[in-house]
Image (cartoon, rainbow, N blue to C red):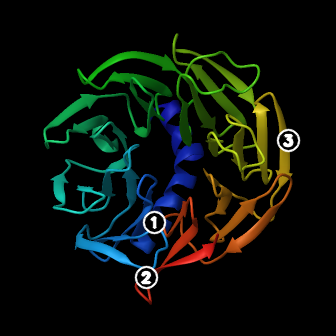
């Protein structure tokens, strides 16, 4: 075993395995299509769609036995569910219609849409699979232990933990075009697309942000594929960027970073100068929509609403995939009642 891979196992896999075990026990994942306000739920071998209030089911279809993740396309028209345990992927239209199933050679751990094409990370094969809207499949070889994927307006980016490498893929040719060396054992990858406001002190143009376990954030300038590290907190594990908004207390481009090592939640318009907020419990996941910013503690199952300087608990007994934050509030899945319920809004 190489030293790099040993470091990944020690520093990177434990929190992710915790997430995976929680999701596995839940066997429910939720998603939200912003354009139509549709709430999506995958559970018990079914896929169900509900209206924006959660009170009316729109349609139901056959799904996957053990859903582990869900992604929705940027235009809100398509969605996909991963089953990391059965090595399957389900693609479907948010408006309803037939569900297309694709078997994968091994563990699909993450996915992202570029347009209407789905890109799936196959961790154990060190591959990324493109599944087009028509169903054609193409595999792209990437570095060892791919785990995170994100898209810009032009490219697909895949981060591999063991090699500490961010690779850029041309979505049209399905070829790796450039790469940059980064830190190993990263836990979250976010992209700020070209044209959005950059945090102060950072270069213009698109940037990638990578959370590292040693108290650092890697910032990659995508135009030149140049990277640099910024020291931040003890163990930044998840980062979210504030979208354009008129209702949130932060400006566009502000970063919110979960740091369970402190424990704290950092806010920053300049990542070199953060404002830490003490959290009641160690939060490790951040979600932001126009309805607000929310921090989740996967260990206790508690969800908090983030204010400018404080956090307020809004729900408990959750898993990482059994709730979704929408424009109309926070909804959770009630497995006993077989329905979606509003918990904050």
Q: Secondary structure at mark 3?
A: strand
Q: Label 2 neighbourhood size at 10 Å, few (<14), some (14-19), many (20+)?
A: some
Q: Are marks 3 and 2 in contact (CB under 8 Å)?
A: no
- At which x and y percent is residue 47? 29, 69
- 12 or 45: which is nearer to us? 45
Quadrant of the frame with the N terminus? top left
Relative side of 302 to 16, left or right: right
Q: CA distance from mark 3 to mark 2?
A: 39 Å
Relative side of 158 to 216, left or right: left
- At which x and y percent is residue 157? 42, 29
Quadrant of the frame with the C terminus? bottom right
Q: Label 3 neighbourhood size at 10 Å, few (<14), some (14-19), many (20+)?
A: some
Q: Secondary structure at mark 2?
A: strand
Which-is-in-front pick, marks 3 and 2?
2
- At which x and y percent is residue 204? 63, 16
Place residue 178 in its image quadrant. Answer: top left
Residue found at the far bottom of this picture: 337
Residue found at the far top of this picture: 224
N-term-proximal mark, 3 vs 2: 3
């Amino acid at each position: 075993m190489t030293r790099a891979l040993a470091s990944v196992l020690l520093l990177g896999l434990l929190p992710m395995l915790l997430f995976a075990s929680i999701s596995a026990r839940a066997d429910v994942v939720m998603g939200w299509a912003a354009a139509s306000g549709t709430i999506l739920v995958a559970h018990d071998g079914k896929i169900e769609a509900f209206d924006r209030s959660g009170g009316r089911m729109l349609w139901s279809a056959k799904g996957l036995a053990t859903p582990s993740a869900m992604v929705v396309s940027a235009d809100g028209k398509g969605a996909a569910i991963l089953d990391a345990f059965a090595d399957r992927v389900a693609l479907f239209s948010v408006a309803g219609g037939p569900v297309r199933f694709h078997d994968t050679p091994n563990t699909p751990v993450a996915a992202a849409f570029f347009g209407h094409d789905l890109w799936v990370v196959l961790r154990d094969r060190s591959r990324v699979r493109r599944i087009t809207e028509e169903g054609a499949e193409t595999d792209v070889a990437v570095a060892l232990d791919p785990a995170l994927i994100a898209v810009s307006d032009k490219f697909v980016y895949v981060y591999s933990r063991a090699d500490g490498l961010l690779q850029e893929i041309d979505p049209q040719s399905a070829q790796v075009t450039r790469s940059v060396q980064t830190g190993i054992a990263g836990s979250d990858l976010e992209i700020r697309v070209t044209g959005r406001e950059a945090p102060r002190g950072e270069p213009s143009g698109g940037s990638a942000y990578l959370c590292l376990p040693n108290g650092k954030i890697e910032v990659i300038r995508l135009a030149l594929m140049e990277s640099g590290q910024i020291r931040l907190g003890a163990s930044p594990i998840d980062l979210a960027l504030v979208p354009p908004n008129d209702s949130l207390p932060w400006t566009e481009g502000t970063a919110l970073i979960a740091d369970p090592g402190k424990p704290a939640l950092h806010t920053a318009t300049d990542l070199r100068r953060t404002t830490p907020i003490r959290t009641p419990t160690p939060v490790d996941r951040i979600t932001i929509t126009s309805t607000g910013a929310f921090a989740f503690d996967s260990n206790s199952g508690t969800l908090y609403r983030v204010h400018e300087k404080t956090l307020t608990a809004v729900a408990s007994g959750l898993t990482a995939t059994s709730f979704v934050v929408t424009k109309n509030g926070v909804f959770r899945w009630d497995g006993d009642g077989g329905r979606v319920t509003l918990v904050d809004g």
